[in-house]
Amino acid sequence: ARSLPRLTGVRTLELFGHRDNRLLADFAARHGAPVRMTTRRLTLTAAPLRSLLVRGPGQDDRTTLLPEDPQVGAAVARLHDRCFPDAPTTAAHLLDGDRHTVVVLLGERGLLGYAAGFTQAKEYYVDVVGVEEDARCCGVGRTLVRRLLAELAARDGVRDRAAAMVRDDNEASERMFTKLGFEPYAELVNYQV
């Protein structure tokens, strides 16, 4: 496959699909693509999503859309690179691209965290949530996801579902999304060569 002209310069090939897809697993095995990671797709639908959107951010919510301040952008990039060093979504994609909506929560000493996502045809997609280590486990991530979904709904209109992907080994993230009402939908696997 790497000899195809369209793949010139491509260093990494990834296959991504449902964990129970035997054809995909067989294809990956034949081509020497080991499992890189497994993830869970979590979704928020119907009444829980509407409730979250109607309730909106709390009164003490200090989350905002990413400001044009280059210092805040640089802080988001540093946090993203620390939290997601091997993610396909780079800091440059978040900050320079038109696809993602980015919200931030700033504290007295600077950036506490950020969330980024986008709207698809039928759903809102929470792509990444990064929180500084000393601000974890106190509601920062939930606050950011609430604001992100509210911003996506305000900009792109109502959707029936919100979704997020969480690595199997990231229990804290799964707890955060579960507290917001997200439920497991599917288990997926990523093969990589």
Image (cartoon, helix red, strand yellow):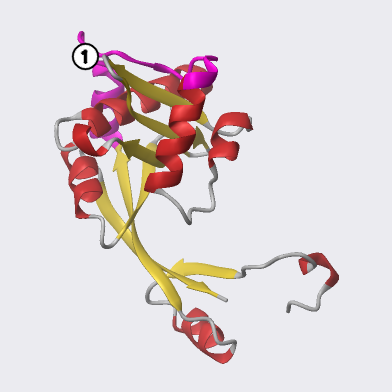
Q: Position of residue 102 (x, y in %)?
A: 47, 27
Q: Position of residue 112 (x, y in %)?
A: 30, 27
Q: Is residue 136 left or right of residue 75?
A: left
Residue 100 position by quadrant: top right
- Taking the view exactly as shown, the residue that stands out farthest to the bottom is 30
Q: Nearer the viewer, residue 91 or 29?
A: 91
- Taking the view exactly as shown, the residue that stands out farthest to the right is 5
Residue 145 higher or lower than 154, as above or below: below
Please check the rendered image and state whether residue 120 is part of the magenta-colored stretch, yes or no. no
SS at mark 1 in the image = loop
What amino acid is at disc 1?
A: Gly
Please check the rendered image and state whether residue 60 is part of the magenta-colored stretch, yes or no. yes
**Can residue 124 be seen by looking at this rendering?**
no
Quadrant (top left, top right, bottom left, bottom right) of the C terminus: bottom right
Quickly name the residue at label 1. Answer: 58
Residue at the (81%, 66%) spot, across then down? 6
Residue at the (53%, 81%) spot, across then down? 33
Q: Nearer the viewer, residue 22 or 128?
A: 128
Residue at the (23%, 29%) spot, across then down? 140
Quadrant (top left, top right, bottom left, bottom right) of the N terminus: bottom right
Residue at the (20%, 35%) spot, across then down? 134
Residue 47 position by quadrant: top left
**Residue range highlighted in magenta:** 46-71
Q: Position of residue 170 (x, y in %)?
A: 25, 55
Residue 37 higher or lower than 170, as above or below: below
**Can residue 184 be seen by looking at this rendering?**
yes
Residue 15 position by quadrant: bottom right
Q: Position of residue 30 (x, y in %)?
A: 57, 91
Residue 187 higher or lower than 45, as above or below: below
Q: Is residue 123 left or right of residue 4?
A: left
- Taking the view exactly as shown, the residue that stands out farthest to the top is 59
Q: Is residue 112 left or right of residue 18?
A: left
